[in-house]
Amino acid sequence: MTRHGKRYRQASGAVPKNVQHGLEDAVELLVELPKAKFDEAVELHARLGVDPAHADQQVRGTLLLPHGTGRSTRVIVFASGDRAQEARDAGADEVGTDDLAKKIQGGWVEFDAAVATPDNMRIIGPLGRILGPRGLMPNARAGTVTDDVARVVEELKAGRVEFRVDRLANLHIVVGRVSMGRDALLENLTSVVEAVSNARPSVVKGTYVHSLSICSSMGPGIPLDPQAVSVRSAVSTA
């Protein structure tokens, strides 16, 4: 059984038992809880009524958080020529082709997102075993395989996040940092909840969202009331 520290126990004790909260109340409670000694991420966790084993029940998407993620996003780009210069001008942290691939094959993964032009995907393929498990593989559906590298780099730097349901039908999405404060976190969280709602597969006819909660990296979960958030039409009334 996991033994939690004093700060966690204090925070957990401040969260009412068996109570679901609206977004505003949940964020207000979260920012008032005892904090760790570092700027914790704030995360949304959802359990969905989909079967990820079926291709038509995949839930994924991207959105630009109104107030960013609260941290600097390190972006690399696989591109050459004019596209490479455009990526550098847009603020990419590393730009290259074979040289960049070799660096990653050597064990370097100090970045948060990877972008590639379509003609460089031949270089990316062998990196799948390294990038895939870390969620860093460029993907056309996520918009990270593109010739418009400048726009994507700028969006990633500004706080674009990607979400995708896991094999157990759960979502885990970072919506900001505790230091951002109540108002910014609330706007970010509202945008994420709406994006998840809009990503509902058309074939899902029953309950889409079974449960939602938010927490800080080292804090207890705060359950959200499905009927008090913007996905109310898609969730269970139980």
Image (tube, grey):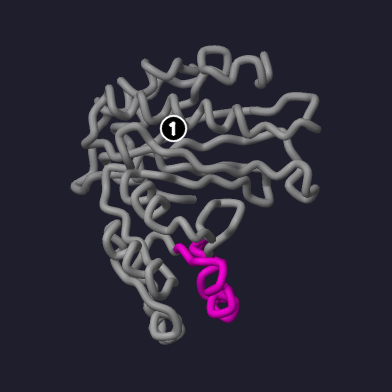
**Image position, residue 104 (x, y; %):** 42, 80
Residue 136, magenta (yes or no): yes
Magenta range? 115-137
Task: Indicate the secondary structure of the residue bearing disc 1.
Answer: strand
Residue 99 sits above or below residue 110 on the image = below
- Badge 1: residue crowd in 10 Å (few <14, some 14–19, many ≥20): many
Q: Residue furthest front?
A: 82
Q: Is residue 151 left or right of residue 204?
A: left
Q: Nearer the viewer, residue 203 or 81?
A: 81
**Image position, residue 60 (x, y; %):** 61, 44
State the quadrant of the C terminus: top right
**Image position, residue 54 (x, y; %):** 80, 48
Residue 168 sits above or below residue 230 on the image = below
Name the chief secondary structure element in magenta. Answer: helix
Residue 214, magenta (yes or no): no
Quadrant housing residue 83 = bottom left
**Image position, residue 84 (x, y; %):** 37, 70
Quadrant housing residue 153 = bottom left
Residue 21 sits above or below residue 120 on the image = above
Q: Nearer the viewer, residue 65 or 167?
A: 65
**Residue located at (29% from left, 32% from top):** 10
Task: Name the residue carrying label 1.
Answer: 214
Three-letter residue code for mark 1 = Ile
Q: Is residue 219 visible?
A: no
Q: Nearer the viewer, residue 98 or 190?
A: 98
Quadrant housing residue 32 = top left
**Residue located at (27% from left, 29% from top):** 33
